[in-house]
Image (cartoon, rainbow, N blue to C red):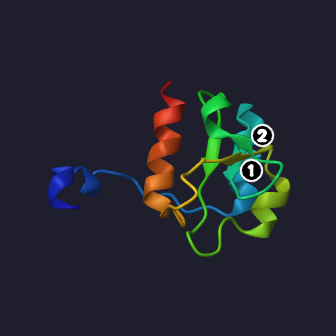
Amino acid sequence: VVRSSMGAVFRTKVVQSTWAEVQSACKTAGIPIAVTALSDRAKDIRSADLSQMAVVIGSEGRGVRQEILSSADAELIIPMNPRCESLNAAIAATICMWQMKK
């Protein structure tokens, strides 16, 4: 992965923040926050407008932390074939970023 980045990984500033800081910054900037979730309230990602939205991806095994899930503006679901068990976080993030560019 490092080699494929052609050194960009060494020029990227890493930012660490608490959830409260991220949530506050998004609210100040008018950016709604969505989470990926397996719930009845979740909206199909294919019909959601993600162009001006931040999306939180949880871990494959545990999903998004309850603190984040309960304070998000929207919940999204990535529909899958019933024979598929789950998506890993990298693939879920890729699908979300693809939808953001649509």
**Residue 54 pos. (x, y %):** 63, 42
Q: Which residue is mark 1?
A: 23
Q: Is residue 89 left or right of residue 76?
A: left
Instruction: Choose top left, top right, bottom left or bottom right for residue 39.
Output: bottom right
What element does badge 2 sit on? helix
Disc 1 element: helix
Q: Is residue 85 left or right of residue 20?
A: left
Q: Quadrant location of the N terminus?
A: bottom left
Q: Position of residue 9 (x, y in %)?
A: 27, 55
Q: Badge 2: how crowded within 10 Å, few (<14), some, or many (20+)?
A: few
Residue 30 image position (x, y, % from top left):
74, 31
Is residue 26 positioned above or below 8 on the image?
above
Q: Which residue is mark 2?
A: 27
Amino acid found under the numbered disc labelled 1: Gln
The residue at the point 60 percent across, 48 percent down is 78
Task: In the displayed orientation, state which residue is furthest to the top.
Answer: 102
Residue at the spot x=15%, y=50% of the render? 6
Q: Residues within 10 Å of mark 1 (few under 14, many from 20)?
A: some
Classify residue 10 as left or right of residue 16. Answer: left
- The image position of residue 46, as x and y in percent, is 60, 33
Q: Residue at image x 39%, y 53%?
A: 13
In the image shown, does 49 or 86 lie closer to the viewer? 86
Q: Residue at position x 62%, y 61% from top?
A: 17
Q: Is residue 7 visible?
A: no
Label of residue 13 in the image: none
CB of mark 1 within 8 Å of CB of mark 2?
yes
Mark 1 to mark 2 CA distance (whole Å): 6 Å
